[in-house]
Amino acid sequence: MSHLEIGKILIAGGLSAADVDNGAFQPARYSPLGDPRGARPLWAAVAHGLDGRPVNRVVVGEDQEDALAGYSIGQELGIPVTQVVESQGQLYILGAIEEGDRALVAAEAFRHEDNLRALIAVVENTKAAVAAVAALVDSRALRAVYPDAVTLWTPDPR
């Protein structure tokens, strides 16, 4: 998939042309609901970008876009998805994270370091391991917490 093709799909999903063309490193939100047919190959490319990292569960946060990301990646890899949600300051696990799991923590984009750190902590507190972190759109927050993350779109961090 070419850089131009990825950019067109991101724009169809709600990122502005300015975000795509000017390399916004704190990205606007991409929604696959605006272009479901385009979103599928994007998430497949993220899943296959793991390059054999052994994962057996996808863990995502509560945002709708992240849930859709988890579903798409889980479907592509044939593994279950667990969602972590916050309510009144408490984190709740919807699904399972089992001891020994090798989790892929995934999101459409990580805009705040605390969100990624919280998901990693939830995985580690269940005695599972974070095998990889992936996001469709790269960001400063992601690189600050997990520099080896897999991303599909890496804007120019001007």
Image (cartoon, rainbow, N blue to C red):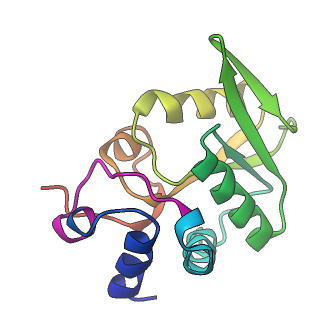
Which residues fall within the magenta stretch?
A: 19-32
Q: Can residue 105 be seen in this view?
A: no
View extreme (left): residue: 158
Q: Residue at x 25, y 61 (%)?
A: 19
Residue 30: name its quadrant. bottom left
Q: Quick check: is 28 in the magenta stretch? A: yes
Can you name the residue that lies furthest to the front here? 34
Q: Where is residue 123 in the image (x, y as percent from the top left)?
A: 71, 34
Q: Name which residue lies at 65% across and 11% down.
A: 88
Q: Tell me the quarter of the picture where residue 94 sits.
A: top right
Residue 156 pos. (x, y %):
20, 63
Judge left or right: residue 86 versus residue 28: right
Q: Position of residue 101 (x, y in %)?
A: 81, 45
Please state the horizontal and vertical placement of residue 69, each as a whole percent of the image: 63, 58
Can the viewer see residue 35 in this picture?
A: yes
**Residue positioned 62% across, 73% down in the render:** 36
Task: Assess whether residue 33 is covered by the magenta stretch.
Answer: no
